[in-house]
Image: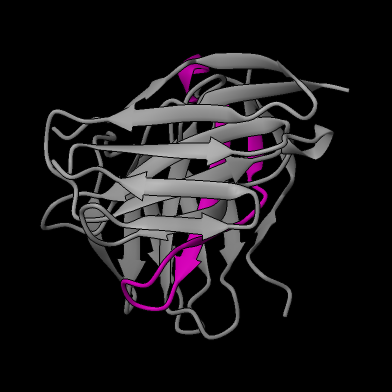
């Protein structure tokens, strides 16, 4: 069992660009949540996907969007990148409302 | 919204010492979670607490769900160098699907 995998590991973008991050959930999991973790902070909930629909959203602007595919994998898209979007982006998967397993994250740097 | 406050922010201890950290909230949580995050990794669930007053152990770790449902603590006994990392308390928000995290307690263990 590979657990939760994320790609890429690291990414460097410039302001105004767009980025897509990818997540494959743990085998058997159907729910994917995305979190943003700024340096020195705890993870902040962005949104959760279940049955290919966004089920709940945190306090993030519309520049942050996502998608879940029929195989339960997910993408996080961020448009019009700002310097403040630099962070570790974590994907977590679960089976329904059971406990979440986190991936290693994607480190995004915006210059 | 619901928030979690962790203390202390950081701890510097000697190998073999016991450690105690806590988490408080102004609102009630029905579940308390404790995670550990190692550098370059996503958080890993250590202990989950489901009811007020519950005391649960996982090896050298012990956590308790406060009677008021507004606090929880985590104890680590006989610390070892691999205990180094960031410890987060977390909980599912009331009536929703997101998990709220505290800012973390950074633990440093000197051999």
Whole-percent x and y of residue A91? 52, 54
The segment highlighted magenta reads A82-107
Whole-percent x and y of residue A47? 32, 51
In the rendered image, the quadrant that contains the N terminus of chain B is top left
Rendered residue at 63%/30% (across/down): B18
Whole-percent x and y of residue A11? 71, 36
Whole-percent x and y of residue B102? 38, 31
Rendered residue at 80%/39% (across/down): B82
Rendered residue at 52%/38% (across/down): B75
Q: Is residue A27 visible?
A: yes
In the picture, measured across the screen, residue B74 lies left or right of residue A86, that is left
As displayed, is residue B107 above or below residue B61? above
As displayed, is residue A32 above or below residue B8? below
Residue A88 among those drawn in magenta: yes
Q: Is residue A86 visible?
A: no
Closer-to-camera residue (B99/B53): B53
In the rendered image, the quadrant that contains the C terminus of chain B is top right
In the picture, measured across the screen, residue A57 lies left or right of residue B43, that is left
Residue A110 among those drawn in magenta: no
In the picture, measured across the screen, residue B66 lies left or right of residue A76, that is left
Closer-to-camera residue (B97/A75): B97
Closer-to-camera residue (A19/A52): A52
Closer-to-camera residue (B41/A57): B41
As displayed, is residue B91 above or below residue A68? above
Asked which quadrant contains residue B51, the reply is: bottom left
As displayed, is residue A71 above or below residue A7? below
């Amino acid at each position: 069992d590979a657990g939760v995998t994320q790609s890429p590991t690291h990414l460097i973008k410039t302001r105004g660009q767009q980025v897509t991050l990818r997540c494959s959930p743990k085998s058997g999991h159907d729910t994917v949540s995305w979190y943003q973790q700024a340096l020195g902070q705890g993870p902040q909930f962005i949104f959760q996907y279940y049955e290919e629909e966004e089920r709940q959203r945190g306090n993030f602007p519309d520049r942050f969007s996502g998608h879940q595919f029929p195989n339960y994998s997910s993408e996080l898209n961020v448009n019009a990148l700002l310097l403040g979007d630099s962070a570790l982006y974590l994907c977590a998967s679960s089976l329904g409302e059971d406990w979440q397993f986190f991936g290693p994250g994607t480190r995004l740097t915006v210059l | 919204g619901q928030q979690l406050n962790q203390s202390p922010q950081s701890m510097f201890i000697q190998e073999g010492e016991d450690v105690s950290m806590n988490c408080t909230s102004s609102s009630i949580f029905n579940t308390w979670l404790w995670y550990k995050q190692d550098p370059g990794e996503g958080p890993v669930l250590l202990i989950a607490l489901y009811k007020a007053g519950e005391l649960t152990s996982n090896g050298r770790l012990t956590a308790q769900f406060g009677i008021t449902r507004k606090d929880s603590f985590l104890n680590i006994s006989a610390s070892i160098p691999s205990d180094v990392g960031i410890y987060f308390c977390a909980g599912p928000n009331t009536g929703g699907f997101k998990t709220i995290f505290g800012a973390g307690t950074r633990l440093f263990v000197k051999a």
